[in-house]
Image: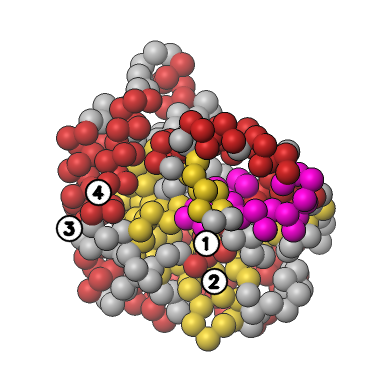
Amino acid sequence: MAGIYVHVPFCKVKCHYCDFHFSVQLKNRQELVDALCQEIRERKDYLASEIIETIYFGGGTPSVLESKMIDQIMTTIHENFELSESPEITFECNPDDITQEKLMDFKTFGINRLSIGIQSFDDNVLRFMNRAHSADEAKNAVINAQKFGFDNLTLDLIYGVPGSSMTSWKKELALMDSLQPQHLSAYCLTIEPKTVFGKWSKQGKLTPTEDQESITQFQYLMDFCADKGFEQYEISNFAKEGFISRHNSAYWLGKKYLGIGPSAHSYNGLERSWNIANNIKYSQLISKNETYSESEVLQVTDHFNEYILTRFRTKWGVNLSDLALISAPLTAEFEKKIQSYLASGHVYRENNTYLLTTSGKFIADGITSDLFS
Ligand code: SF4
C-alpha cells in the first residue's frame, strides 16, 4: 500500500509566518495542473503497481483550484493508479474557499477528509498573521462541511503566536472543541528568517514568544486534548478514535509515496527524490520532457536516521528490532547514547521500544538529532 501527495503551490495571499513553496499568481493554475497531470502519467510506475491507499492534496492552498482542475487531477490519478476499496482522500482548504458548490464537488470527486487551515479563531490574530479569512468564516467552514456530511475533519491551529497568552490559547482550544472535529494539528509558530515575521523580528518590530510560554501552551494543549478524548499520536497531531491520518502515518511508518508537483518529495523504499521548487520552471521542464527532479539512493545511515527522526515523534516510538534490521552496529551505538536521556527522564522504554516522555516531547528535535549516526 502506498500514498500519493499532490502539491498545489498557490495561495491567495502570503501569510506572514509562512516559508512554504507557493505562488500568488493564480492565473497560472491551469498550466500547472496540466503539468501535474503529465507528471502523474509519467511516474505511474514509480510505486511499482502498489495499491494506492491514500491521496493528499496539500500546499499552498489546494482549495484555490477550480473544481474542473481537481476533477482533472483525480481523473488522471484514477486512470494511472489502482486505488484501494476505501482510500483516504484528504484535501487542504482555507475557510474562505469552502463554498457549498465546492463541498458538493469535493464529494463527487471522492474527497472524504478535509483539512481546514484555521490557525486561529481570533480576528486580531488572523489579521496579524495576514490570513485571508475571518474567525466567522473559519467557524462557518467547519459547520458547512459537517452539514454536507464530511465526518472526517481536521483543523489546524497555531500556538506560541507573539502576543498570545494562556488565556487566549485556552479560548482557541475551547472553540476548536465546540466544533467537534475528529482531528487536530497544532503547531508552534516558528519565526523563519525569510518571512515577514522574520523581517519584523530582525528589525525589532516583533518580539517572539518566550520559549517558556510556548512550552506552557504546548503542555496545556496535550492535557486539553487528552481530556477531550483526542489521542496524541504524533507530537503535533491529535485524533479521536478511528481518525488517525492514514496518509501522514504512512510517512512516519516509512511507507512509500509519490509526491507530485513543484517541491514535492517522493520515496519508493530505495531512493528519495524531490522536484524543482519553482512553478514556472517545473511546468516548462515537464512540457519539454526535461528533468525536473533530483534523487539520491538512501544509504544505511540515511535509513537509520530517518527511522529515528520520524518514529520518535510518534506514539509508535523507536523499536530496537526495527533498528537492528537496518543496522546492528548502529543500534548498539544508539543504545549507548540513549542512556543519558533515560537517566534525565526525557525518554522511557516499554518492552523493546523507546518513547519520548512529556518533557522529552518539548525537546524532541534536539534529542533525535543527537541520536543520529
Ligand atoms: S495559506 Fe498556507 S501555504 Fe499559503 S501562505 Fe498561508 S500558511 Fe503558507
- The percent position of residue 164, horizontal first and vertical second, equals 25, 31
Q: Nearer the viewer, residue 230 or 35?
A: 230
Residue positioned 33% across, 39% down in the render: 218
Q: Which comes sooner in the sequence, label 3 or label 1? A: 3
Would residue 10 be visible to someone looking at this image?
A: no
Q: Which comes sooner in the sequence, label 4 or label 2? A: 2
- Which of discs 4 and 2 lies nearer the camera? The answer is 4
Q: Which comes sooner in the sequence, label 3 or label 2? A: 2
How crowded is the residue under tag 4: few (<14 C-alpha within 10 Å), some, or many (20+)? some
* Inter-mark Cα distance, 4 to 1: 22 Å
Residue positioned 25% across, 71% down in the render: 146
**Which region is colored magenta?**
308-331
Per the image, the residue denoted by label 1 is 249
Q: Which comes sooner in the sequence, label 3 or label 4? A: 3
* Inter-mark Cα distance, 3 to 4: 13 Å
Q: Which comes sooner in the sequence, label 4 or label 1? A: 4
Identity, as a three-letter code, of the amino acid under mark 2: Thr
Per the image, the residue denoted by label 2 is 54
How crowded is the residue under tag 2: few (<14 C-alpha within 10 Å), some, or many (20+)? many
Identity, as a three-letter code, of the amino acid under mark 4: Phe
Per the image, the residue denoted by label 4 is 224
